[in-house]
């Protein structure tokens, strides 16, 4: 599914190196978590995978089902099946949420050689998926994320993910700023999408999301590298002892 080899990334505008040789292999159907202190490069990794401007890849590769992602435009990466749920979802004034979703879904279908959904079929699917995420019809009519609470924005990210049916889902701190109930809704939304053909990379600063989205593999990132990999017990170790012990052990 996703294979990252020796990925080195610096900022385009400055001589600041952020990723220093990231290796990561996620098989179909697996859920991996990346934890790590603030500033370790977790968000940068997700941005670079999705093709955000401002970063320069100086070495390494990232392939999705054998196709090099780093050479694709962001929309080609999405068409290939990659989805990124942002740590800070953006507001898009003037673009209705429903219009946004329908445009994205139909662009995705077109890229896959499938027919567009009719207005009626689209409405049926979006309403059904919105309901399970407790997103009400009124929120679907409003401009994308404008005036949404933190929890509503994150749930809206999961709705986008559910509508696009990606094969590789990257969630960057989808739990940050959420109360327990909102986090559970997000986790349920993610769990409902777990499937043998779909993989997840869940980036989180805290362990609590991983009580609800059970990962197969947990990685610890520090200073632009994955410094330790283990099972779910690694997340509990971080919860109990912080990162200091692991950092010291690795040094
Ligand atoms: P994390 O998500 O693990 O908290 P980030 O990927 O956001 O880490 O950031 C990694 C490091 O790179 C931090 O030191 C951050 O300040 C820096 N960084 C990332 N993007 C930029 C940018 N566009 N401009 C300046 N510094 C950046
Ligand atoms: Mg951060
Ligand atoms: Mg981050």
Image: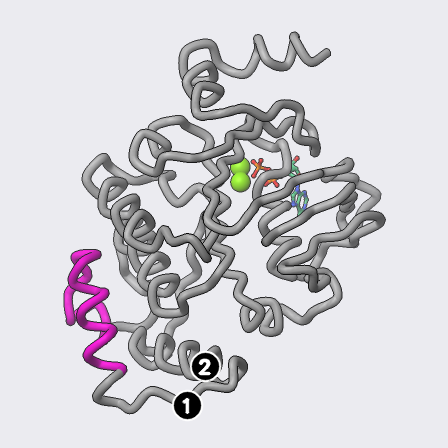
Residues drawn in magenta: 122-141
**Most distant residue in the front direction:** 196
Q: Secondary structure at mark 2?
A: helix
Q: Secondary structure at mark 1?
A: loop
Q: Circle 1 is placed at which residue position?
A: 115
**Residue 100 figure quarter:** bottom left
Q: What is the x, y in percent for residue 172? A: 48, 45
Q: Nearer the viewer, residue 99 or 22?
A: 22
Does residue 166 lie above or below 41 as drawn? below
11 relative position to 106: left or right: right
> Which quadrant of the figure contains the C terminus?
top right
Does residue 118 lie above or below 153 as drawn? below
**Label 1 neighbour load within 10 Å: few <14, some 14-19, many 20+:** few
**Residue 136 drawn in magenta:** yes
Q: Circle 2 is placed at which residue position?
A: 109
Question: On residue 181, which mark appears?
Answer: none
**Residue 215 drawn in magenta:** no
Whether tag 1 and tag 2 are in contact, CB under 8 A, the answer is yes
């Amino acid at each position: 599914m996703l294979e990252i080899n020796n990925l080195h990334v610096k900022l385009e505008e400055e001589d600041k190196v952020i990723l220093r040789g990231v290796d990561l292999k996620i098989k179909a159907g697996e859920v991996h978590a990346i934890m790590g202190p603030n500033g370790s490069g977790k968000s940068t990794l997700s941005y670079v995978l999705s093709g955000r401007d401002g970063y320069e890849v100086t070495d390494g590769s990232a392939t999705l089902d054998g196709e090099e992602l780093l050479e694709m435009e962001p929309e080609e990466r999405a068409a290939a099946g990659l989805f990124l749920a942002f740590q800070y979802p953006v507001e898009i004034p003037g673009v209705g949420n429903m219009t946004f979703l329908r445009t994205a879904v139909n662009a995705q279908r077109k890229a896959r050689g499938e027919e567009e959904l009719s207005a009626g079929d689209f409405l049926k699917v979006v309403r059904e998926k919105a309901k399970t995420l407790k997103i009400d019809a009124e929120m679907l009519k409003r401009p994308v994320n404008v005036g949404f609470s933190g929890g509503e924005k994150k749930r809206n990210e999961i709705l986008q993910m559910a509508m696009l049916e990606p094969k590789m889902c990257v969630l960057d701190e989808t739990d940050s700023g959420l109360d327990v109930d909102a986090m559970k809704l997000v986790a349920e939304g993610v769990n409902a999408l777990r499937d043998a053909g779909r993989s997840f990379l869940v980036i989180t600063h805290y362990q609590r999301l991983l009580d609800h989205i059970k990962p197969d593999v947990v990685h610890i990132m520090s200073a632009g590298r994955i410094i330790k990999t283990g099972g779910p017990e690694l997340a509990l170790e971080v919860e109990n002892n912080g990162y200091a012990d692991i950092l010291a052990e690795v040094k």
